[in-house]
Image (spheres, coloured by chain):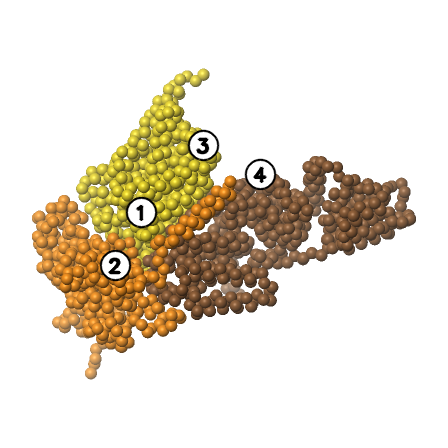
Amino acid sequence: MKIERLLFFLIFIVSIFLLSGCWSKKELTDLAIVAALGIDKNEQGRYVGTMQIINPGNVASGLQGGGGNQGPPVSIVSGTGDTIVELSRNTSRKLSRRLYYAHTNLVVISEELAKEEAINEILDSLERDAQFRSTAIIVIAQGKKASDIVKVLTAIDKIPANKVIKTLRITEKTWGENIAVNVQEAIKTLVSPGKELVVSGFRLSGDVSKGTKTENTQQTEPSALLYAGSLAIFKNGKLVDWIDGEASRGSLFLLDKLKSSAIAINWKGKEEAVTYELIRQKTKIMAKMENGTPRVSIKVEAEGNLGEIRAAADVTDPDVLLNIEKAIEKEIKKEINQAVQQAKTYKADIFGFGEALHRTNPKVWKKMKSNWNDVYFPEVKTEIVVDAFVRRTGLRNNPHKVNK
Amino acid sequence: MEKARISLYQLFVLILLFELGSAILVPLAIEAKQDSWLSILFGMAGGLFLFWIHYRLFLYYPELSPPEYMQKLLGKIAGNLLAFCYIILFIYLAARVLRDFGEMLLTFAYLETPLFMVNALLMLVIIYAVSKGIEVVARTGELFFVSIYLLAITGFILIVFSGLIDVNNLKPILEEGIFPVIKVFYTQTLFFPFGEVIVFTMIFPYVTKRKKVIKVGLFAIGLSGINLAITMAINIGVLGVDLTSRSQFPLLSTIQSIQVAEFLERLDVFFMIATVISIYFKVSIYFYAAVASTAIIFKIKEPSKLTYPMGLIVLFMSVTIASSYAEHLKEGLEFVTRYLHPFLLILFPLLLLGIAFFKNRKRSTQPSP
Amino acid sequence: MTMSLFSLSKKMKKLKLQKKQTQQTGHPQPVKAIHSALQDQIDYIKEKTGNSTDVNIRKLQLGDGIGPNVAVVFIEGIADSKAINDFIIESTMNHRTVHNSRPLFEILLEDVVALGDVKEITDWENLFLSLMSGESIILVDGSHKALSASTRGGEQRSIQEPSSQVTVRGPRDGFTESIRTNTALIRRRIQNPNLWMENMKIGSVTKTDVSIMYIKGIAKEDIVQEVRNRLKSIEIDSILESGYIEQFIEDEALTTFPTLYHTERPDMVAGNLLEGRVAIVVNGTPFVLIAPAVFIQFFQSVEDYYGRADIATALRFLRILIFFISIIAPAAYIAITTFHQEMIPTQLLIAIAAQRETVPFPALVEALIMEVSFEILREAGVRMPRAVGSAISIVGALVIGQAAVQAGIVSPAMVIVVAITAIANFATPAFAVAISSRLIRFGFMFAAATFGFYGIILGVIILAVHLCSLRSFGVPYLTPMAPLIVENLGDTIVRLPLWAQKKRPRLFSSELENRVGENQKPQPPKSKGMVNSIIEKGDQDEN
């Protein structure tokens, strides 16, 4: 009896395994691993998707597979459709494998498209899809088509998508005029009435047609080069304008995303004489109501070293350092102010002042919510307090003097 | 009743795993927005009270299982009828949890697999475990409890270290006043997951030290409530209210957001392990309660023989109770919490306790010869 | 000590007698009594043994009578011929003066046979039992009784280092095929009269000697009784190894996991006896069974107790990890490459994808090819004569490692996985568990190939339920983790220092008093003076 039951059970299990035939199974050799997805719009108003598909044999310089470095590390495939899912399925006519989005770490949206229509409609399919990772980074193709950014081969990082992401991350950390925003953060910002989206742009210099050939990676100075561009400001999901330079660094200060940077200040009348290497900073934004108008106080604490001194300055003297600190504070304040002013002109609250108000005065916020960007945000009074500290001055104290 | 002995620690582990079960996966109490953690804690307080009711009832009849004392309290026919209602409830809830699980697995990892297959496999494992008896289920509980907690702690540390939590997402507290929180409490969290602790009345008679059941039970419910509240707070902290409420499985989205050191990312497997194991326990306990009650009502000597047919009922029910996930959720939130749970989880136990109180008072006031 | 040993052996004899009586009552048919004439006796033995050439019958003359009146019967090879020559034959021949007043039998027993263990035998069945176990039988003309003298011996393997459980630190002696040597090795370690031993013969044809050993007062009485009962109820023609017994007395037959521990090491047996377990020693094999066995025991090595606690703990964690690796590694590889490509970092995925690009098989088939060919190699390596072994390893390394990869049949990643799995499997300290994990591994591979990680997790749950449902002589297999017994957790995956392990395993030892005394934690000398005075002395010397 017991043996019979066991036998039945075993047959049942085995038949489940055999019959199931592996529904969700996908062998690696049947997958086209998409590294980056570029989205454009063509003349007919349909979406054009450009997928950067990894060619594993040409990326990994392994033992086998023969000549590892002969072919390009990625291949490009594109499809058109009225929706994102449609264009993705449409590509199957050109591809022998299934598109696999779980390793898509980069989404490029063309500037034209972002200006024309709200990008949240595009993001829905990405968010909903089980394969797609919401940690993928979004960039805007600045002045180019998204497909151009996706197509170009890069030298050091073999997979172009990786190059874009790493560049953004590194420059966010060491320079601070760009920001790596992923899909999830973008959606979070888009749905929040008290904050608008900022996304980095990516630019392409040189010739696209040359950039798609492997020769592009076999020269010391590539003919086509991808590099991080300006910051794109969105309002209601549409791109309104770009900011760059000091204003974009000011924005990163306000977003509390800045990790380190180099800030040059004037000293004793000499322009850009001392360079301050920021190593960490913390920004706090507090909102409150004052006489019926919102007032935002911004408090920045910056810490860093002196990286370069090109004027006579006695940095062994703490008082001198204090003065330098003041100059730095002024410079940072200026940058932040620039950013705030720019955002106000676009009537786009990219810094989340509205969210800050929501946290402290939920009742007032309820009334202002619907008109925040257009009516209240440009009227917000800001009060900026910067505390900068110079901790060290490098291996030398005073700069050398040339005595001749 | 099988001859089994459950230690207090095993009871504690089972209650904890049961409470965390499916509740940790879904956006629990998200109608209360950023205050959902508060709603959960209220629900926990309600759960503590309900547990006390079940415990008092158990103290009146420490040797008897619920179907038996229901017969004593209400008479043979009415008692059996009520016990039968509970069997159906347990089977239905087991099927619901199984469905939840199947839907989750299908949504995030096994898109092309039929729901029936995924559910059938887990149900087979559950049938196997339950047919081995409650002791074995309890022992596996002890075994997995440690691993689940290690996993949870690791996940927590990773989330904290990747700097994902934005405390601002939890502010402002009580934006709309206390009323929405209370409303979520009495429409959801009181019943799911805390009211469901009623299923443990079937397990009480096995516990070795009866006097301490209340202490252990309250502690387990309290801890599970705190765990759920922390989980929900972390979900909201990482994802924000909007994303959490739109997520079918916020914990999955939270775990997917983890990116530490360019290496510790894509940790979905964490989520899958936690899910399968916790759902396994939740369904097992419901299923065990259903099987054991049936065996008592119909006087079947070997409950393990019931596991196969009843397991198939749960399996088919789980596939057929709703045609879509949305319908399934709606059913759970509207129908079950409105028309089933208030009566079966709160009203009837209170009623039984009242009857037991009067019956036993009469007996004790009578002068004993 | 000798006193106690003596009393113990007496006790054993008593037990033996009791057993014999019970056996006799068990078989009611009358036993043939021994003939009285010497020649009849000899003829009967010859007839019964089929004139086997190793049955030696030596007729002797006791006293100065005419013709042989005594015969010594023994089996060549299993009896100690030197002892027979010196203490039976020689002393019989030298015993010339016989008082006719006493019967020959008494003279033999009291004056002649110079051996310790001499018994009277009255029936043929016992005579043959004694004869076949290596004792020599002395037949006396005109008597219905015979003498059996304990001359067991003959050529045996000497005590050698055990080959199955090797340690760096620890005693070097291992069990042999002789039951007496083995029990002696155990008794040498536990010199206490409470170490009790019970003998029985199992196997209707082989009549194999089996002893159970336990420490009275530490072992739980009902477990000892259970062992006794299960052994007694065995009905089989032969017991050739302790594995025969294992298969009859385990709790659950439908499992790949061992529910009895077997070892070649006397120190291991001694340690387990002291925890309240029961040892079953079987004649003819160096493997002693220990019952009850719990799961965690198979991940412990005796050396854990001889070395430092912290290192032992780390090693035990490693072994648990090893167990999981050896079960799950190939399954995880299959799951990742066919279902969950999203779960590994992009760079790693690309690396694996590049390798798999040229592989013509699905991942499951690839894994099966490698795993099966590895199992073939291992089986060949174990069974082949030593001299050929190295040739196999060369061929194996070439086939599995290089050629298969170069031919593009398997990917290097798969080779790595198989290699890790194999090494992990070798590193499991108990062979019995290692071999069962080999089998389970294939189940997991199929589960992973059909349902990915979901299949693996379900497999782990089934495994856990199965392990939880196992019992060894009534003791839950996963004690003390499930059910949790906090006071016994000190010797599981962690190994606390010996002075911190106060309690014996609660579920199978009756001795609940502490194993170690209070305040046993080693400490530096209380007064610093001792150390300081030496330093001061040194300083003074310098002056």
For marks 3 and 2, give the CA distance.
56 Å
**Could you say whether the residue bearing mark 4 is in a helix, strand or loop?**
helix
For marks 4 and 3, give the CA distance.
32 Å
Identify the disc placed on residue B300. 3
Q: Which part of the image, by quadrant, shows the N terminus of chain B?
A: top left
Give the x, y percent position of residue B2.
46, 34
Residue corresponding to mark 4? C222
Near mark 4 (Cα within 10 A), the count class, few <14, some 14-19 or many ≥20, is few
Give the x, y percent position of residue B59.
40, 29
For marks 3 and 1, give the CA distance.
34 Å
Question: Can see residue C4?
Answer: no
Residue corresponding to mark 2? A89
Is the Cβ of the residue at disc 1 closer than 8 Å to that at disc 4? no
* Left or right of residue C203, residue A341 in this image: left
Identify the disc placed on residue B103. 1
Labels 1, 2: one chain: no
Chain at numbered mark 4: C
Labels 4, 3: one chain: no
Q: Colour of chain C?
A: brown
Task: Tell which chain the image draws in orange.
Answer: A
Q: Say which residue appears at 40% left-offset and 64% top-offset.
A: C360
**Could you say whether the residue bearing mark 2 is in a helix, strand or loop?**
helix
Foreground mark, 3 or 2, reads 2
Residue type at the position of mark 3: Ile
